[in-house]
Image (cartoon, coloured by chain):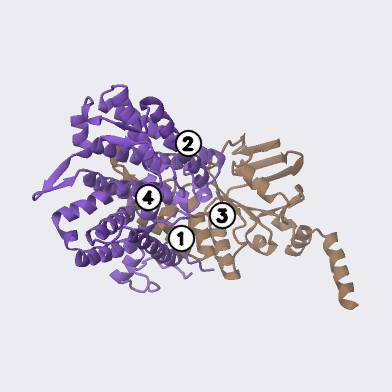
Chain colours: A purple, B brown
Amino acid sequence: MTTTTKEQPRVDERVAPRGPLDRLVVRPEIGSIIGALAVFVFFSVVADKFLTAPGVATWLDDSATLGIMAVAVALLMIGGEFDLSAGVMTASTALVTAILSIEVGLNVWLALLLSLVFALGVGALNGWLVVRTGLPSFIVTLGTFLALQGLNLGITRLVTGSVQVSGMRATDGYESAGFVFASTFDIGDTPFQISIVWWLGVAAVAAWLLTRTRFGNWTFAVGGSAPSARAAGVPVARTKILLFMTTALAAWLVGSINILRFTTVQANQGIGLEFQFIIAAVIGGCLLTGGFGSAIGAAVGALIFGMARQGIVFANWNSDWFMLFLGIMLLGAVLVNNTFRRRAERVRR
Amino acid sequence: MTALIEVDGIGKNYGSVVALRDVSTVVNAGEVTCVLGDNGAGKSTLIKILAGVHQHDTGRFLVNGEEVRFASPRDALDSGIATVYQDLAVVPLMSVWRNFFLGSEPTVGRGPLRRLDHRRGRETARAALADMGIDLRDVEQPVGTLSGGERQCVAIARAVHFGAKVLILDEPTAALGVKQAGVVLRQVAQARDRGLGVVLITHNPHHAYPVGTRFLILKRGASLGSSEKADISIEELTRQMAGGAELEALEHELREVAST
């Protein structure tokens, strides 16, 4: 520490001038953007159909619903928690909407509203249990994951006698709800799914929330060090519960998109997706330990996922290879993130 | 002048364990009250009561002459009592200015468009730190890249900036090297000279003596007395802290071991 003079220069002589490259390297999402470019170039070269308009529409569509969830899960992970029930929640919300509108005969919009209330309730329950018990969210949400899985199957069989609910097209209000959640728009002559717009919107709002608002600041703080955040007067419990409710909200959005688009929902849908969300968030620069990450990065992580999954199909390879690719991507991302984290966290005594 | 904080015969039990028994001292504006004691002496219990983390069971706790009982750290903060803990002062992965404003972020706009004021936050943090003689390279760097002493300084500057009248420092020098400890002690002296009341918890009499006004020595949850600086020398302070007669016995024993 040196003595301070009144007229302090804006640029300190102890700071080596940082080039634009050095500035970029500390951004959490930079690894995923480079990865996305590499995957994009690779499949553009090896698969003819990849770069055509219908091809782009296909892999963007695949990335979209995954991306919506990955962004919400990234916020939660930055806040230092996991939500293993997020995958099954996408099916639960779709089932609630479907049963209420098809079996009970409610207007689709009313069914969607009730489904939203249900989702936010489950999210709040997850958060409340984690905050109240102090147990790892991994265990608590594993519990809700299993419970919801059982409820999905049990209630569906009880109401319909089978393990699926279908017939959404005949319901009251399907047209307008379908327009909002499951329509397509044309660019050139190619139809693109509206879910892509939702994905971009969710990513933009989440990125703004995370870096530009008090809530975002608190999210980083509760994930980085909850005791410090509490000592500084941050409402730790409220922040965490709201983050769990955010993933539930995203699951409701994805569930609504799915049920209105496919008009049918299987009771065992969504199982295993929770890990895809976490993988996309980690590829996007989130630390498993919390306190660091990016919403844009998670959206890009989902894009890598979609491009690779569809690219492998376009290249006429066996889709078995996708898992190998995924594993390598994940390991690479974790290694890169770890290096960046150490740069950021390096302690001097 | 009423004392900023006065504790009178304060005590705290955890179940059947008596953690603190009949401790009395005062904290005045522009003075440093040092709380000294070995591990397990009850230092943490005392400051946790002052900081609103725990509530006292016996005795009286007065702030500005009025008896209080804080329900939470937020209550203590609202009364102008800010605590800087040794380990949990800052969030390492967050930038200096975000840490500085954590919990009290400056915002612009209203309703759903209410957002952080980055520019004001950065500039205020830089100015407030420079004002305290802490010259940081870059307020956008993560706090984790700062040295231990600098981190403590950021936390102290934060408390002072947000209008603390009493600053409680929990072992601020414990994990620091000699030079870094000096930096932190200079901050303590500065806060004192600005008219804050400071409570400095430490087990190092050499850190406490130069900045302290009053020394409260705790041992096994009880007070060994509160002395003004004029009434006690550093040798006496060290002797009392270590347990006086016990230390002499130990010295004697060690001498015997060495001579055989």
Q: Nearer the viewer, residue A28 or A40?
A: A40
Residue type, numbered disc 4? Phe
Q: Residue at x 39, y 55 (%)?
A: A279
- At label 4, counting other C-alpha atoms closer than 10 Å, the crowd grade (few under 14, some 14-19, many 20 or more) is many
* Residue B130 picture quarter: bottom left
How far apart are the alpha carbons under marks 2 and 4? 20 Å
Farthest left residue? A188
Q: Residue beneath label 3, please?
A: B192
The disc, 2 or 4, on the residue closer to the chain's N-terminal end is: 2
**Which image quadrant: the C terminus of chain B?**
bottom right
- Under circle 1, the secondary element is helix
Position of residue B245 in the picture relative to residue A86 (left or right)? right
> What's the amino acid at mark 1?
Val
- Spatial CA distance of label 3 from label 2 is 58 Å
Q: Mark 4 sits on what residue?
A: A277
Label 1 crowd (10 A; few <14 / some 14-19 / many >=20): many
Tag 4's secondary structure?
Answer: helix
Q: Which residue is mark 1?
A: B143
**Circles 1 and 4: CB distance less than 8 Å?**
no
* Residue position for label 2: A147
Image: B253 above or below B14:
below
